[in-house]
Amino acid sequence: MLDYETLKLIWWLFVGILLIGFAITDGFDMGVGTLLPFVARDDMERRIVINSVGATWEGNQVWFITAGGAIFAALPIVYAVAFSGFYIALLLVLFALFLRPVGFDYRSKIKHPYWRSTWDWGLFIGGTVPAIVFGIAFGNLLQGVPFYFDEDLRAFYTGSFWQLLNPFGLLAGVVSLSMLVMHGAIYLQIRTVGEIYARSQRAVWLFGGLFLGSFALAGVWLVWGIEGYQVLTMPATDALPNPLAKTVVKQAGAWLTNYERYPLTVLAPVSAFLGAGLAMWFSWMQHLKLAFISSSMMLSGVILTAGCAMFPFIMPSSANPDHSLIIWDSASSHLTLTIMFYATVIFLPLIIFYTSWVYRVLRGKITAQHIEAHQHSAY
């Protein structure tokens, strides 16, 4: 059996892998939803765009659900505090996500243009709002969330929904939206032809440029304008979880400590910048598989950049830094992490294999002829 300290570290990595899987698979779904009203000009073009993700978007939700379930089971304190602090924001995400299944299923049931236009904008909201809110959440995590615990470990959130919409949080939202829309535009290039393909190619460059600019600005802001957190004293890393038993300070440049201590972690932000640049180049040269791999590298780089900067912090507390949640004092019991570890080792490869097989079977271009030939099954 693996020791408790190792399991805590493994589950930090697993949650990161699940978030990356969610960003790569469900990320292009959201990007396609955001682009829907802009790259498709008539009803047939919009049906082509919708059907480019129509057969796989539900399967992609597995990564979202699995990531949420993993945080709930492996990091229950983080899950509870996050839902308390980000309650309205998460409800906003859920209500936006509700528009996706009903939009996909009901849009083509009635031919009236107002009906279909309404659901087109519903799918736009279902793709855009979660992409922005997820970025805002990461931006606020880097600044610290205003919560604290009482002596009975009851969490209290002292902020408000509007405080989440601070300038750095909104900038992180722009980073998140631009990278997911760019990822979705590359996927549309893979699945479409003609005018939709050309508009998607232009979208790759537009949102790729926006991502590079906003991500660089966020990095500069993080280094010079935001204080990070650092643990001074804490119990042993294999001790039973107790978020109140450590000492934490806020100080300028603390989020760079891991990059100075472990130089290889610099590969994370480098991958984000390099992946975006390569994705734009391969998109222009029409090497679309390489473009998709590059944009996936960009998404992974962004998530790993935040993870490497914050480690071992998961949710820093700006109200009382000593009450911050880190991987060593917010994980589940040794037995729970062990059982979840073996379940993940068995089922995660199956999910990856099944997802890969589905995409291989459903590969190919979506055209007007394809839609007309599948009137009873196409969205």
Image: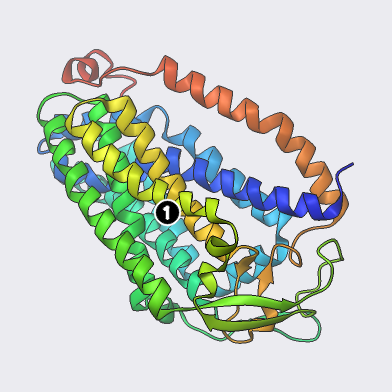
Left or right position of 187 against 301: left
At x 47%, y 82%, the residue is 160
Name the quadrant containing residue 317.
bottom right
Q: How many numbered marks have been drawn onto this rendered protein structure? A: 1
- Looking at the figure, which quarter contains the C terminus? top left
Residue at image mark 1: 269
Q: Secondary structure at mark 1?
A: helix
**Near-viewer residue (376 or 296):** 296
| Nearer-the-camera pick, 60 or 213 | 213
| Place of residue 70 in the rendered image (x, y in percent of width and height, measured from the top left) | 66, 49
State the scheme by which the image is colored. rainbow
Q: Residues within 10 Å of mark 1 (few under 14, many from 20)?
A: many
Say whether residue 219 is left or right of residue 153: left
Position of residue 12 relative to residue 141, above or below, is above
Residue 69 lies left or right of residue 242; in this view the side is left
Q: Is residue 224 above or below residue 265?
A: below
Nearer to the camera, 212 or 50: 212
Determine the residue positioned at 50% across, 60% down: 306
Residue in the image at 24% along x and 48% along y = 208
Q: Position of residue 20 (x, y in %)?
A: 50, 45
Question: Residue at (59%, 57%) from the top-left corner?
Answer: 262
- Between residue 50 and residue 20, name the one nearer to us: 20
Point out residue 119 in the picture as x, y percentages from the top left corner: 26, 46
Q: Is residue 110 left or right of residue 6?
A: left
Is residue 107 at least partly visible in the picture?
A: no
Q: Is residue 91 visible?
A: yes
**Quarter that holds the N terminus:** top right
Task: Kindly identify the amino acid type of the residue bearing the numbered disc 1.
Answer: Pro
Q: Quadrant of residue 278?
A: top left
Q: Whole-percent x and y of residue 316?
A: 60, 74
**Is residue 343 placed above or below 73 in the rendered structure?**
above
